[in-house]
Image: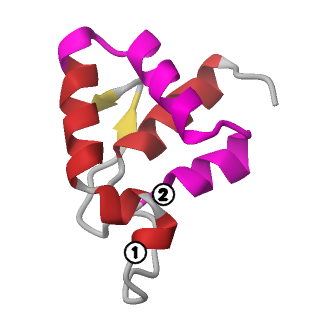
Amino acid sequence: MELTARNIDRIIEMAWEDRTPFDAIEFQFGLPEQEVIKLMRRELKEKSFKRWRRRAQQRGKLKHRALRSDEVKRFKCSRQRSISQNKIT
């Protein structure tokens, strides 16, 4: 799949969402976790990347489907604000 600006924006949005597992990004865009990390490093400011990486590691049980509890059924938190243009609105 071609990584257009729109696709990159969506991948970043999905990566920031706590409940979206890396498997969902790989299924939709064909990018494994390591490629998502490279994309995030390339597209985000350094401080934003470090903040995201720390958050993703702390939320490991949600970001990796195999580690999730069976109680987690959705990808996106119902309280999460929408993200566009890589900025929280």
Start-end of magenta stretch: 20-47
Residue 89 visible from this viewpoint: no
Q: Position of residue 72 (x, y in %)?
A: 39, 80
Q: Position of residue 12 (x, y in %)?
A: 45, 33
Specify whether residue 43 is painted magenta. yes
Q: Which mark is residue 21?
A: 2
Q: Residue at x 70, y 40 (%)?
A: 29
Q: Is residue 35 magenta?
A: yes
Q: Is residue 82 left or right of residue 51?
A: right
Placement of 31 over or under 45, stated as above or below: below
User: Residue 54 location in percent, x, y?
Assistant: 20, 37
Badge nearest the viewer, 1 or 2: 1
Residue shown at 45% from the left, 57% from the top: 20
Q: Is residue 5 above or below residue 69?
A: above
Which part of the image, by quadrant, shows the C terminus?
Answer: top left
Mark 2: few/some/many CA within 10 Å (<14, 14-19, 20+): many
Residue 88 in sight from this viewpoint: yes
Badge 1 marks a residue whose secondary structure is: loop
The part of the image, by quadrant, that contains residue 51 is: top left
Helix or strand or loop: what does disc 2 sit on?
Answer: loop
Inter-mark Cα distance, 1 to 2: 9 Å
Residue at the extreme right of the image, as rendered:
1
Q: Residue at 69% of width from left, 19% of height from top? A: 4
On the image, numbered disc 1 is attached to which residue? 68
Camera-side residue of 66 and 88? 66
The quarter of the image holding the N terminus is top right
Instruction: Check the image and report above or below for 24 versus 72.
Output: above
Type of the residue with mark 1: Arg
Q: Given contact means CB atoms under 8 Å apart, are the residues at marks 1 and 2 in contact?
A: yes
- Label 2 sits on what residue type? Pro
